[in-house]
Amino acid sequence: MQVKQWIGGFLMFSAVAFAEAEFSLPLKLLADSPGYVFMVPDVVYERAHYADLRDVRVFNALGDEVPMRLSKNLDQIKKTFSEVTLPIFSLNQSTQIPVNSKQVKTTWEGGLQRHTVDTSNIVKNYLLNQESERLDTILIDASSVLNEQAVALNLAWQFPIAGNRVFYVELKGSNDLSRWQVLQPKHKLVELDTGDRVVIENSIPLPGAAFEFYQLRFLDLPIPEVVAVRASMQYQAVNAEVKWSEVSDFQVVNSSDIGHTIAWELDGYYPVEAVKFNFDYKNLMADVQVYSKHSAQSTWRRVAKGAVYAVGTGEMSMFNNQLALYGNNHRYWKMTSQSAISTQWVDSISFAWRQHQIRFLAQGEGPYSLRFGQNLRNKPAISQWYQQLNPGLKQSLFSNQVAFAVFDKVEPMSESKEDVNSETHSSTWLFWGVLVLVLTGLLLMATQLLKEVADD
């Protein structure tokens, strides 16, 4: 029974390992690394057998499939932070407060440092109309960063007497200085000096929408002197990884029953995410709908609709020539428009698509090749190993020093074509030799077993 299982497993593995691919693209490894990563070239999308690239594999010189992982190249989001000092005001009426504009200014008079704060009239009137002294509360003017993405307020304070402290504050927000919303009912701040290091937790998160003004109230004694409040802003930069390719040809269809229609066919299976209609037409306004289908026999389904326009001039101009859609890899496309303007205003059509990335382990001897077009319907690529890697290895294990030895020529492969790689020939003969030996051994074992049964 164990022999049968071993033989069955061996035959299954060998059938996959030596399966003939329809196309082969040689890879050239330029670094000494256990793993490699590269972007799938355009020619694979043109000639792959399946739209989801399930037939794409990496093989070594012996014809063995090596572990690989295929994934889409996603957008990269880079976050940066900055700080802006905000004007702060005490609500104690006995304090002289110069109020004029929105910037914090520092001047020197002899050996004394003097802080002057300019702010708006709404803040000035609010400060002058306070009915009682509020020693435990300060007002923060955040109007200068209202349109920024402020994520926290960072405080700098000092106490009359040094010491380790844990104290609590309440934070409110307002846009008109009359209606206040509680943002942090009881937030903990910390200042600890252990001798070896100083621990300070001086940040107050800003949840939800931004406010023009904030009111900070200390809930316990003693009350520190707040010397500065800085707003921490977060900025996100998205590095879009989509590619734009132009449609090689399209046809304008004029028919009364379908309106103005433009039809085109892609030359491969591309994961399309947007369509762009390039034109040079003044004062254009057209409502369009985009349809797609997988094959010529499939049914059309709408994937996007919207307005394409170029209206106005100068600062009053508005322009839009593209529509985003839920990504698919259909080959057949059309755009319809019920506008009185004919669709002949379209000069060219482009589509946005996202490349895939392949990570593979260099197991066995090279040279390696990227093969695709083979009939692997029910067997996915060997990719479970990648999920078992820790985050550090997922980043450091793979080198991008991969080149395509024959980039402008994809070599077709078939059963009748003589393989130019002598090592592959040797591995094939070795496989059949081992298979003949195993089958001969099984035959001899079966013959011996039949004789023993007959003697009994």
Image (spheres, rainbow, N blue to C red):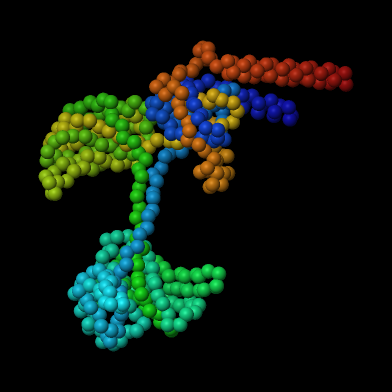
Work out which residue is located at the far front of the displayed protein and give it: 110
Residue 179 visible in rendering: no
Report x, y in % for residue 372: 47, 25
Residue drawn at (17%, 28%) of the image: 254
Residue at the spot 14% in from the left edge and 49% down from the top edge? 315
Q: Is residue 301 above or below residue 318?
A: above
Residue 426 in view: yes
Taking 370 as reference, is 383 above or below it?
A: below
Quadrant assignment for the C terminus = top right
Q: Is residue 36 left or right of residue 446?
A: left
In the displayed structure image, the side of residue 49 where residue 97 appears, left or right: left
Please state the horizontal and vertical placement of residue 338, each as a whole percent of the image. Answer: 17, 37
Q: How many marks?
A: 0
Residue plotted at (55% across, 33% down): 32
Choose top left, top right, bottom left or bottom right for residue 161.
bottom left
Is residue 417 depicted above or below 221 in this figure?
above
The residue positioned 53% from the left and 26% from the top of the image is: 368
The residue lying toward the viewer, choosing from 132 and 414, is 132
* Residue 385 position by quadrant: top right
**Image location of residue 400, percent across then percent down:** 47, 35
**Residue positioned most to the right:** 456
Q: Quadrant of residue 410 in the image? A: top left
Residue 212 image position (x, y, % from top left): 27, 68
Task: Using residue 425 as the reference point, say whether residue 92 is left or right of it.
Answer: left
Q: Quadrant of the N terminus?
A: top right
Asked whether 286 or 155 is in front, the reply is: 155
